């Protein structure tokens, strides 16, 4: 029942897409007899779910079909020649979507090329690649998504995306009374958090930290990928150039006493206007009472600046030293104020990122500071408190920005530093591997081959899927048997989900794949409604909690994975955000050859 409702809801969107991006027309399938109308072909495509980017040639290759059928074939896009024939797997009932799902396994196909799946009686899929390094372009577009979020500077996505540009924005900043200070404080820079133009320490920290981690773990694979950003070619790898844009702003948010203010935003959310049209002052916002800065923000700064101190050392020793000093001062502040939490002060209604417990942020900071400096005080703090965070490794937090305990534990375990506590390292590794094995099992049992469970379909569920992928990739890094691919394969399953192998057959990354979502809650995109949205941005995804009016109006009995709307107004299911964007980058980087 809902299936038809949802399909009806989607058809106009898809028609708009075809008009805008003008893909080569999908050839009608003789066998399916559904080529008569564009709409019929479209809904058939929705029932055949593929990763619209593609599948690595040497890995498992599975598409999903949600209309009854028995066989499938793979056809070459260039000439429609069938190159592979297969039988669909048994229909499995998926409780999260209400769909009956059959797998089309074409792992045995070993020839690079561009293909689509043809299912007699159903229709055809969108085109996708099979190849050696299929995700490279998606990686670079996802990274360039961060560039598109830059604040305080003119942005231009360049020849690949002509017209996606804006003049410098948010150049005027000032202290809000809640900060304990007054007067002008411009703090130009950083990334727009999401669909709004606020800049927040919590998400900037996780995002910059995840990008720096991506570099530390996958640097060899990504160091030569140019992102075509203003700094490209300056001798520093582009992922570090982009991360620095966020970091520099974070450093400006540190007060003289070492503490960091929570955020810098206008008093309320602006309308759906372009960044440069938002001329409200950008206010530095604090807790409203001494010490005005907050512990989570300050500890996040300490953690990220500590990573920066080691990562930028070979490229810019002065910046590295500045970052280390900031990290030490931030840490010292958190020792003095171990849990000053934040809530919006009166008059402020932008996102609060309120977090009642900053101990995980402190654990992360201690781990990174120890890893960078080797100093005993940081390690002592870590060893005194890490054990309580081990259970957190079993599953990522559903609000992925609230809990960074995993980052602290993994960083400690991965540190090459002598003098690490062997018992702690072993406990972290064992727990991570056990958690990942459980996630692999759950993903295998899930008809959609995704790690998410019912309770994970919350605001930012796509970020939760990406976070599961990160856990799996951390296990892949730590795995004892180097030939064991099960963790990396399961992480890729989560990526496949994000790139089109999902209930909506949507690529949840803008302008990636042939059938991407079109209406992110993203002001720069909504301000130019006649063109596809700004590129490379991950949607928040299905949200069973329905925290906006669009979701509230959907049929009451929708299963959790279907509570989603590709509409601008649905901020609770369709907003982009830098923290889940960063996890996507990590997953894609893990795929680079
Ligand atoms: O645009 C805002 C988005 O970034 C937030 O995530 C969301 C929830 O805090 O709020 C959005 O702003 C809406 C506001 O809360 C209510 N009025 C309409 C705003 C734009 O849709
Ligand atoms: O990602 C945040 C989500 O976990 C919360 O439930 C939600 C409501 O507080 O806020 C989300 O974060 C938004 C922030 O408050 C403002 N900028 C946009 C963020 C993404 O929607
Ligand atoms: Zn801006």
Image (cartoon, rainbow, N blue to C red):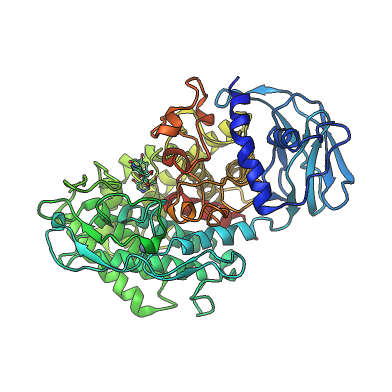
In front here: 383 or 410?
A: 410
Q: Is residue 200 left or right of residue 497?
A: left
Residue 97, given in percent of the width and then of the height, sits at: 57, 26
- Residue 484 visible in the snapshot: no
- Residue 31's x, y, as percent? 88, 32
Q: Residue at x 43, y 65 (%)?
A: 243
The one of 247 and 217 positioned closer to us in this rendering:
247
Which residue is at 21% across, 44% downward? 343
Q: Nearer the viewer, residue 116 or 347?
A: 347
Q: Where is 265 relative to 479, above or below?
A: below
Q: Is residue 372 left or right of residue 148?
A: left
Observer able to see residue 195: yes
- Residue that extends furthest to the front in the rendered view of this protein: 530
Q: Is residue 165 above or below residue 478?
A: below
Quadrant where the N terminus sits is: top right
Residue sitting at x 72%, y 35%: 39
Q: Position of residue 104 (x, y in %)?
A: 75, 34
Q: Report the number of discs.
A: 0
Looking at the rendering, the quadrant in which ligand 1 lies is top left
Judge from the rendering whether residue 578 lies leftward or rightward of residue 88; answer left or right: left
Place residue 266 in its image quadrant: bottom left
Q: Quadrant of residue 318?
A: bottom left
The C terminus lies in which quarter of the figure?
A: bottom right
Query: Residue 163 in the image: x percent, y percent?
Result: 55, 65
């Amino acid at each position: 029942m809902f299936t038809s409702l949802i399909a009806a809801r989607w058809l106009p969107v898809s028609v708009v897409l075809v008009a805008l991006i003008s893909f080569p027309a999908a050839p009608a399938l003789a066998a399916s007899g559904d080529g008569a109308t564009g709409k019929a072909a479209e809904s058939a495509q929705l029932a055949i779910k593929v990763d619209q980017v593609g599948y690595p040639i040497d890995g498992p290759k599975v598409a999903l079909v949600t209309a009854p059928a028995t066989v499938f074939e793979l056809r070459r896009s260039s000439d429609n020649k069938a190159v592979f024939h297969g039988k669909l797997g048994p229909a499995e009932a998926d409780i999260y979507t209400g769909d009956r799902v059959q797998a089309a396994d074409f792992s045995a196909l070993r020839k690079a090329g561009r293909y689509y799946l043809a299912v007699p009686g159903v229709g055809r899929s969108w085109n996708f690649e099979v190849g050696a390094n299929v995700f490279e372009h998606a990686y670079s577009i996802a990274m360039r998504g961060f560039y598109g979020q830059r604040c305080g500077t003119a942005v231009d996505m360049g020849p690949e995306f002509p017209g996606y540009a804006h003049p410098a924005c948010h150049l005027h900043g000032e202290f809000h009374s809640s900060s304990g200070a007054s007067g002008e404080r411009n703090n130009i820079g950083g990334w727009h958090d999401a669909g709004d133009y606020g800049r927040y320490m919590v998400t900037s920290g996780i995002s910059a930290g995840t990008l720096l981690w991506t570099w530390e773990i996958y640097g060899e694979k990504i160091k030569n990928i140019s992102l075509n950003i203003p700094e490209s070619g300056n001798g520093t790898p582009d992922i570090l150039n982009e991360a620095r844009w966020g970091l520099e702003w974070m450093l400006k948010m540190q007060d003289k006493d070492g503490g960091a203010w929570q955020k810098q935003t206008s008093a309320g959310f602006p309308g759906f206007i372009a960044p440069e049209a938002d001329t409200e002052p950008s206010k530095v916002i604090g807790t409203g009472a001494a010490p005005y800065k907050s512990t989570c923000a300050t500890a996040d700064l300490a953690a990220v600046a500590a990573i920066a101190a080691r990562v930028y050392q070979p490229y810019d020793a002065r910046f590295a030293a500045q970052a280390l000093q900031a990290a030490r001062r931030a840490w010292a502040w958190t020792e003095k104020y171990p849990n000053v939490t934040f809530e919006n002060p009166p008059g402020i209604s932008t996102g609060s990122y309120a977090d009642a417990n900053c101990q995980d942020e402190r654990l992360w900071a201690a781990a990174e500071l120890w890893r960078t400096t080797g100093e005993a005080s940081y390690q002592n703090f870590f060893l005194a408190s890490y054990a309580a965070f081990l259970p957190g490794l079993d599953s990522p937090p559903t609000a992925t920005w609230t809990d960074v305990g995993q980052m602290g534990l993994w960083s400690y375990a991965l540190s090459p530093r002598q003098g690490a506590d062997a018992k702690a390292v072993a406990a972290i590794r064992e727990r991570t591997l056990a958690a990942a094995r459980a996630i692999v099992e759950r993903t295998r049992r899930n008809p959609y081959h995704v790690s998410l469970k019912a309770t994970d379909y919350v605001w930012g569920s796509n970020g939760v899927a990406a976070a599961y992928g990160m856990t799996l990739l951390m296990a892949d890094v730590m795995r004892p048997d180097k030939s064991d691919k099960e963790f990396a394969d399961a992480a890729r399953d989560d990526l496949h989900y994000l790139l089109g192998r999902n209930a909506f057959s949507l690529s949840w990354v803008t302008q990636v794949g042939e059938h991407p979502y079109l209406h992110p809650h993203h002001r720069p995109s909504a301000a130019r409604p006649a063109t596809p949205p700004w590129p490379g941005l991950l949607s928040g995804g299905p949200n069973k909690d329905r925290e906006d009016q669009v979701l509230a109006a959907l049929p009451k009995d929708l299963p959790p994975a279907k509570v989603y709307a590709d509409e601008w107004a649905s901020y609770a299911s369709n907003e982009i955000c830098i923290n889940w964007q960063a996890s996507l980058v990590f997953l894609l980087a893990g795929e680079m050859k």
